[in-house]
C-alpha cells in the first residue's frame, strides 16, 4: 500500500489524538467526555452484547423504509415537475417552503394524524427526504444534456426512448437528492426516536443515556449515529459510481 492510501486516516488519527490529549490533560473533564478508548470499549460491548446493535438495526430499518418511501414518491414526482418547467415554476414556492421547514417542526401534526407508533417515525423521515429528492430530480430532468436528447430525436427515437435518455441524464442529480435525503431522513428519525416515546433506536439510546448521565453510552450512541450516516452515504456513493459511471462524459 502506498502512503496515499493512508491519507483519509490522517484526519481521524489527528482528531482522536487531540481528543485524547484534551481529556488526559484535564482540559475537558473526563466525566463529561471519556477517552476514545472508553467510548470504543462501550461501542464494542454494546455491539457484542446486543444492546447498541439492536438499536442500530431499528434505526437502519426506519431510515431505509423512509428513504424508499420518499424515493418511490419523490423521483416520479420530480420527473413530472422537471418535464414541465411551467408546472415546476408554479409549484416552486410550495416546494421550497416545505423543503425549508424542519421535519421536527411538523412532529405535532404527524402525531395527531398517525399517532405514536413506528410508522410515524418512518413518515417523518420520509417527509424530510422527499422534498430534497423531488427538487434534485426535477433539476436533473430540466438540465439534461440537450445534445443527447436532440440526438435521440434526430435518430428517430420514440417518446419512451427519449424519456429514458432524459432519466439517465438526470441520474447524477437524482443521486445527489438521494444522498441528501438519506442524511435528512437519518436526522429526522433519530430526533423522532428521542422525543416521540420510542422504546428503541439510536435516538432513544442517546436520550436514555443522557437522562441517566451515562456519558460513555451516550457518546457511543452518538458515534454509532455518525458512523451509520457515513456508511449509508458511502453505500449510495458506491451505487452511483456503479450505475452512473458515465456521468460527466
Image (cartoon, grey):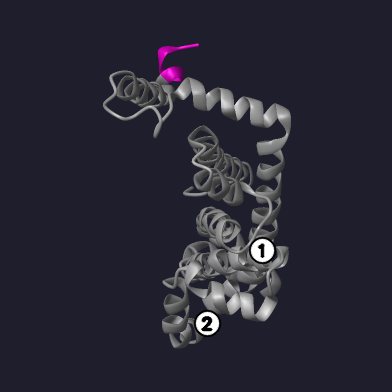
Q: Main secondary structure of the magenta part?
A: helix
- Compared with 90, 132 (above or below) is above
Residue that mark 2 sits on:
84
Disc 1 or disc 2, which is closer to the eye?
Answer: 1
> In this rendering, does residue 151 appear at all?
no
Front-most of residues 6 and 59: 59
Q: How crowded is mark 2: few (under 14 residues within 10 Å), some or many (20 or more)?
A: few
Residue 182, located in which quarter of the rendered image? bottom right
Start and end of the magenta stretch?
Answer: 1-6
Give coordinates of residue 73: x percent, y percent: 66, 71
Q: Which residue: 60% across, 57% down? A: 193
- Say which residue label 1 marks: 122
Decide which of 25, 15 is in the foreground and name it: 25
The x, y position of residue 92, in whole percent, is 44, 81
Quadrant in which residue 229 is drawn:
top right
The residue depicted at 55 percent of the width and 40 percent of the height is 221
Helix, strand or loop at mark 1? helix
Q: How many labels does the image show?
A: 2
Q: What residue is rendered at 57% in x and 79% in y?
A: 109
Above/below status of 208 relative to 96: above
Q: What element carries label 2?
A: loop
Amino acid at each position: 500500500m502506498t502512503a496515499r492510501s493512508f491519507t483519509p486516516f490522517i484526519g481521524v488519527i489527528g482528531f482522536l489524538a487531540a481528543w485524547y490529549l484534551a481529556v488526559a490533560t484535564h482540559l475537558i473533564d473526563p466525566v463529561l467526555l471519556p477517552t476514545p478508548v472508553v467510548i470504543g470499549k462501550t461501542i464494542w460491548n454494546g455491539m457484542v452484547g446486543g444492546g447498541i446493535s439492536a438499536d442500530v438495526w431499528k434505526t437502519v430499518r426506519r431510515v431505509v423504509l423512509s428513504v424508499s418511501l420518499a424515493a418511490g414518491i419523490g423521483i416520479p414526482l420530480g420527473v413530472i415537475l422537471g418535464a414541465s418547467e411551467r408546472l415546476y415554476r408554479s409549484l416552486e414556492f410550495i416546494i421550497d417552503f416545505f423543503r425549508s421547514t424542519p421535519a421536527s417542526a411538523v412532529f405535532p401534526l404527524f402525531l395527531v394524524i398517525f399517532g405514536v407508533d413506528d410508522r410515524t417515525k418512518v413518515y417523518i423521515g420520509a417527509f424530510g427526504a422527499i422534498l430534497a429528492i423531488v427538487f434534485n430530480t426535477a433539476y436533473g430532468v430540466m438540465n439534461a444534456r440537450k445534445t443527447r436528447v436532440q440526438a435521440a430525436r434526430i435518430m428517430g427515437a420514440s417518446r419512451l426512448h427519449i424519456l429514458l435518455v432524459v432519466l439517465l441524464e438526470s441520474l447524477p442529480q437524482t443521486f445527489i437528492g438521494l444522498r441528501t435525503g438519506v442524511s435528512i431522513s437519518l436526522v429526522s428519525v433519530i430526533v423522532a426516536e428521542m422525543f416521540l416515546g420510542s422504546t428503541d433506536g439510536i435516538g432513544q439510546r442517546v436520550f436514555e443515556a443522557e437522562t441517566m448521565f451515562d456519558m460513555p453510552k451516550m457518546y457511543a450512541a452518538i458515534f454509532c449515529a455518525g458512523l451509520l450516516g457515513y456508511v449509508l452515504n458511502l453505500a449510495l456513493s458506491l451505487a452511483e459510481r456503479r450505475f452512473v459511471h458515465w456521468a460527466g462524459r
